[in-house]
Image (cartoon, rainbow, N blue to C red):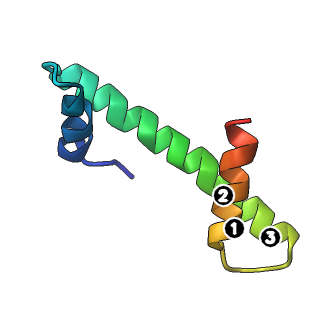
């Protein structure tokens, strides 16, 4: 899975600074890695509750756990 670089570049450009291609690619990679960590944790939370569906509450709990 690879996040598209263009949307990541648009987010970076909100700083009103120029952004290198390498910076955009690195940011996209960071977002992807972070998303995978959150989704993995959310899936574990759902599984611990004997569910096959990841819910919004699982994502929120995973985010809190990872960024605590």
Give yes or no for contact between labels 2 and 1 (Cβ–Cβ under 8 Å).
yes
Callout 1 crowding tier (Cα within 10 Å): few <14, some 14–19, many ≥20: few
Percent coordinates x, y for residue 31 in the rendering:
43, 40
Quarter of the picture containing the C terminus is top right
Who comes first in sequence, dot 3 or dot 1?
A: 3
Look at 62% across and 50% down and name the residue there.
Answer: 38
- Mark 3 lies on residue: 47
Disc 3 is placed on an element classified as helix
Q: Nearer the viewer, residue 52 or 57?
A: 57
- Mark 2 lies on residue: 60
Whole-angstrom CA distance, mark 3 to mark 2, is: 15 Å
* Front of the two marks 3 and 1: 1
Disc 1 is placed on an element classified as helix
* Front of the two marks 3 and 2: 2
With respect to residue 31, does 56 lie above or below? below
- Mark 1 lies on residue: 57
């Amino acid at each position: 899975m690879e996040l598209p670089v263009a949307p990541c570049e648009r987010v970076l450009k909100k700083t009103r600074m120029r952004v290198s291609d390498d910076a955009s690619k690195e940011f996209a990679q960071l977002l992807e890695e972070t998303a995978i960590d959150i989704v993995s944790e959310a899936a574990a939370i759902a599984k611990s509750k004997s569910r096959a569906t990841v819910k919004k509450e699982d994502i929120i709990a995973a985010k809190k756990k990872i960024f605590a």
